Amino acid sequence: MIISIASGKGGTGKTTVAVNLALSIPNAQILDCDVEEPNSHIFIKPEIKTKKPVFIPVPEVDKSKCNFCGRCSQVCVYSAIAVLKKDVLVFKELCHGCGACSYLCPQGAIKEVNKEIGFIEVGEKINLQFVHGRLNIGEAMAPPLIRAVKKYINSTGINIIDAPPGTSCPVIESIKGSDFCILVTEPTPFGLNDLVLAVEVLRKLGIVFGVVINRCDLGDEKTDKYCQKENIPVLMRIPFREDIAAAYSRGVSIIEALPEYRKVFQELFEKVKDGKFS
Ligand code: SF4
Ligand code: SF4
């Protein structure tokens, strides 16, 4: 089973839910796909066993074979290659490594060379398997690294995906294929605005989802009313507590600081697993 944890905006407590859920389920695996800023490791503190770089193939043009026909530039939907009168420029930072230009070059003038975009670390913490990706500084191509992280999905186990915040391409790459998505929000106007956008994305992708309201006692009732109106199950509410905030600031999970919360997160998992949302 794949359960992704997402949020329309950052800072809602998405990683808190992902980490505590993963730590509450025996023999689960967490995959941190927030590759631009992974931080689930701060709370899990896994023992890292392996680290490997991730590459994408980018074009390299042999100008002695090139006749500057412009075909490569026409087929690149990312504007990552430009053909001048007597030159071809490759903008590697824009290249998605799709291979279209080298495949369609009529002169066979393009070969692909590997460009490192980041790395993956794999580890464990007692009963929890851990995988995360980390994008190199200045690198923009998160989706290929997210795909590389998702290759570690255990098809027979419970996989918790910590998705990036927002509703852009890296989020879609992270959550697609999920059996269920938990949207974490907070009951504020900004939180609701971004929740509505995230709900639209999930409905388009056809992924079953529910909502966790974090800091549920700060803010207003509009988020609850929206969920009610849209028939979206509210799976769990986490109150604002100074001890939870203090644990977070020390890099300590909720269930470690307040062990009674283990049961609360286990109940969240049971609801998601069984599809019983009342
Ligand atoms: S498609 Fe090939 S031959 Fe044409 S401009 Fe690009 S690299 Fe040169
Ligand atoms: S590999 Fe794809 S994205 Fe990169 S330059 Fe070629 S066509 Fe564009």
Image: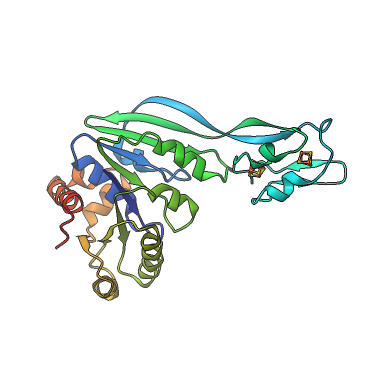
The percent coordinates of residue 18 (x first, y second) are 29, 47
Does 77 sit above or below residue 229? above
| Quadrant assignment, res 197 | bottom left
Ligand 2 visible in quadrant: top right
The percent coordinates of residue 205 (x first, y second) are 39, 57
Left or right: where does residue 63 sit relative to residue 21?
right
| Quadrant assignment, res 226 | bottom left
| Residue at the (64%, 36%) spot, across then down | 58
| Residue at the (66%, 32%) spot, across then down | 112
Asked which colour scheme the image uses, the reply is rainbow
Does 167 sit above or below residue 249? below
The percent coordinates of residue 131 (x first, y second) are 36, 35
Does 264 sit above or below residue 138? below
Q: Is residue 238 visible?
A: no
| Residue at the (59%, 41%) spot, across then down | 98
The quarter of the picture where the C terminus appears is: bottom left
Left or right: where does residue 113 sit relative to residue 164?
right
Q: Which residue occupies the foreground of this view, 94 or 24?
A: 94
| Quadrant assignment, res 6 | bottom left
Q: Which residue occupies the foreground of this view, 21 or 240?
A: 21
Farthest residue toward the right? 85
Farthest residue toward the front? 106
Q: Is residue 64 visible?
A: yes
Q: Which residue occupies the foreground of this view, 231 or 136?
A: 231
Q: Which residue occupies the foreground of this view, 182 or 1?
A: 1
Number of marks in the rendered image: 0
Does 166 sit above or below residue 252? below
| Residue at the (27%, 70%) spot, across then down | 227
Left or right: where does residue 63 sit relative to residue 110?
right
